[in-house]
Image (spheres, helix red, strand yellow):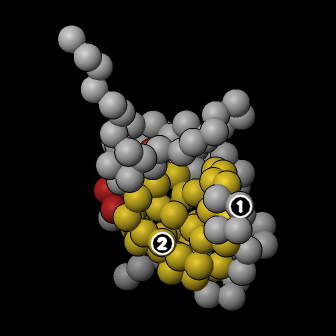
Amino acid sequence: MARKAPLPPSTYRGPVRHEPGWSFVRLGRPLGLCPIADGLLVADTYNHRIRHLDPATGRVRRWTGSGRPGHVDGSADTPCFYEPGGLSATGRHVYVADTNNHAVRVVDLASGEVQTLGIG
């Protein structure tokens, strides 16, 4: 029996594979897109991360998020999102609709620090 061809990256729902040694990226339900000064941010929803895409090179890298579902603020790889969806940027911050946490998260563009926006 012949093997089926893999699904194209835009429809594949598995883990992202654009880490050292890999030459492609597979986003898990990329819902939100947001331009920033040095590229485009992508909400990698099912991988619980925000990715950075450089349109000039096509390179994708991890921007924030540990990849584990949860609700943790912090910097670098510490923050946990739970299916981030929408993204919106201002000059200093990126706002993330963190879908299953029912929260708006704020990422400082200069420091990378993630905090939960207090609402109510």
Label 2: state its secondary structure.
strand
At x 47% / y 44%, what residue is drawn?
Answer: 26
Count of numbered circles on the image: 2
Q: CA gap, disc 2 to disc 1?
A: 17 Å
Q: Splitting the image into 4 quarters, where does residue 25 fall?
A: top right
Which quadrant does the C terminus fall into?
Answer: bottom left
Mark 1, residue position:
57
Q: Splitting the image into 4 quarters, where does residue 99 fall?
A: bottom left
At x 41% / y 79%, what residue is drawn?
Answer: 119
Q: Is residue 6 above or below residue 104?
A: above
Task: Specify whether 69 is left or right of 90.
Answer: left
Residue 92 at least partly seen: yes
Mark 2, residue position:
33
Three-letter residue code for mark 1: Thr
At x 32% / y 56%, what residue is drawn?
Answer: 100
Task: Specify whether 120 is left or right of 107.
Answer: left
Query: Which comes before the other along the chain, label 2 or label 1?
Result: 2
Which label belongs to residue 82? none
- Foreground mark, 2 or 1? 1
Residue 113 at least partly seen: no
Query: Is label 2 in contact with label 1 (beta carbons under 8 Å)?
Result: no
Instruction: Give the crowd class for mark 1: few <14, some 14-19, many >=20 residues within 10 Å.
Output: few
Three-letter residue code for mark 2: Leu
Give percent across and percent down for residue 67: 52, 42
